[in-house]
Amino acid sequence: MYASNVVRFNKQRGLSLIGLIFTLGIVAVIAIVGIKVVPTVSEYFNIKKAIQVAKQAGPAARDIQATFEKQADVGYIDAITSKDLVITRNGEGVEVSFAYSKKIPLVGPASLLLEYEGTTAKSGVVSKKTAE
């Protein structure tokens, strides 16, 4: 047998139309969820920055709340207000914490619940009691 008479069939490789549609569907769902989640994550980081600035305002809870309100106006923060802040006193000074949840509707009855919390404490533990 001569090599020129042998016909080789190579299997085609690639993505079928159904595979492409399925892959694009998954990518679209991930993109839609991402588009809805990114603004809430951005707001969370704005809140973390705002409580850091508010903590520097002074030891009085009123000063911290007033400074946070100013930062909230500038940073387009709608998720919490200054009344939602947990302000605690410890031996080293004042710590400011917050916790909130955000419900993002997806499709029909399906929704995504995100729970955010943050603090200025070095330990990273969110305090649950308020300062007097």
Image (cartoon, grey):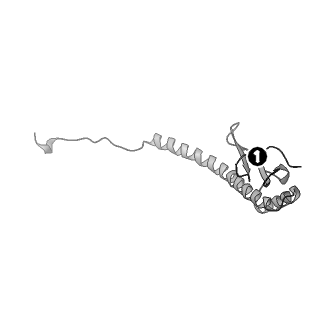
Q: Secondary structure at mark 1?
A: strand
Q: Which residue is mark 1?
A: 99
33 relative to 25 in the view: left or right: right
Q: Residue at x 70, y 48 (%)?
A: 124
Q: Is residue 22 above or below residue 42?
A: above
Q: Is residue 13 above or below residue 82?
A: above
How many numbered marks, from 0 up? 1
Q: Amino acid at mark 1?
A: Ala
Give the percent coordinates (x, y) of residue 110.
Answer: 68, 37
Q: Residue at x 46, y 41 (%)?
A: 19
Residue 56 figure quarter: bottom right
- Report the residue that reaches farthest toward the top: 109
Give the percent coordinates (x, y) of residue 74.
Answer: 78, 63
Image quadrant for the N terminus? top left
Give the percent coordinates (x, y) of residue 123.
Answer: 70, 49
Give the percent coordinates (x, y) of residue 34.
Answer: 62, 49
